[in-house]
Amino acid sequence: MKIYEYHINGRIPSKKNSRITNKKTGRSFPSAKYYAWEKMAMEQIKCLSELPDKPIEKCKMIHVNIYYPDFRVADNSNKFESVMDMLVKVGILKDDCWTITGKTSQSPIYRKNNGGANILVYVDDDVS
């Protein structure tokens, strides 16, 4: 089994809760703050980690430790979705649908003044 491990530093924003609505069209988009985080996270992953040769099409499991720098109220599942969407955008996953991700799990962990995430992607050796 191949395990890809990725680390992201900094507070993870919720893509869902940081949306901005265009008053003319009524369409909503993630905030500039979310896009800045996404760009920073993708750069960290590209610079510091081994990327698969092509986007992974079948995982056995994905586990994400989400590190909270304080005790501010936050929605863990929305932060997990932000991480999963970023994994697709950076080219690690083909998509974040259940048929590709396999089993997923997330753990919220307090880490004083040090937010971020640790991501483990488990892939069978014969599948990628």
Image: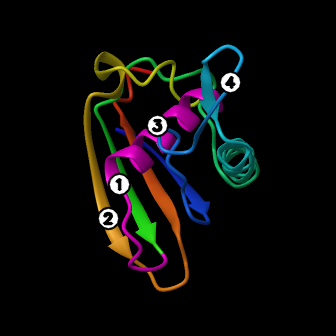
Q: CA distance from mark 1 to mark 3?
A: 15 Å
Q: Name the image quarter holding the C terminus.
A: top left
Residue 110, located in which quarter of the rendered image? bottom left
Pointer 3 residue: 84
Of tags 3 and 4, which is closer to the observer? 4
Mark 2 or mark 4, earlier in chain: 4
Which amino acid, by three-letter code, is at mark 3? Met
Instruction: Using a 10 Å C-alpha cutoff, classify the residue at mark 1 as few (fewer than 14 neighbours), some (14 to 19) or many (20 or more).
Output: few
Q: Which is nearer the N-term, disc 3 or disc 4?
A: 4
Which three-letter amino acid code belongs to the residue tagged 4? Lys
User: Could you tell me which residue is drawn at 45 percent across and 51 percent down?
Assistant: 119
Region rendered in magenta: 69-91
Contact (Cβ within 8 Å) of mark 2 with mark 1: no
- Residue at numbered disc 4: 23
The CA span between labels 4 and 1 is 26 Å
- Color theme of the render: rainbow
Query: Are the residues flagged by discs 2 and 3 in contact, CB closer than 8 Å?
Result: no
Q: Residue 32 or 115: which is nearer the viewer?
A: 32
Residue 109, quarter of picture: bottom left
Earlier-in-chain disc, 2 versus 3:
3
- Alpha carbon separation for disc pair 3 and 4: 28 Å
Identify the residue at horizontal 41%, vertical 61% (top origin).
Answer: 66
Residue holding disc 1: 75
The amino acid on which the numbered mark 1 sits, given as a three-letter code, is Asp
Q: Amino acid at mark 2?
A: Pro
Element under disc 1:
loop
Quarter of the image where one finds residue 20: top right
Q: In screen coordinates, is 103 left or right of 77?
A: left
Q: Which residue is mark 2?
A: 108
Is 6 left or right of 68, judged from the image as shown?
right
Q: Compute the Cα span from label 2 to label 1.
A: 10 Å
Q: Residue at x 59, y 58 (%)?
A: 8
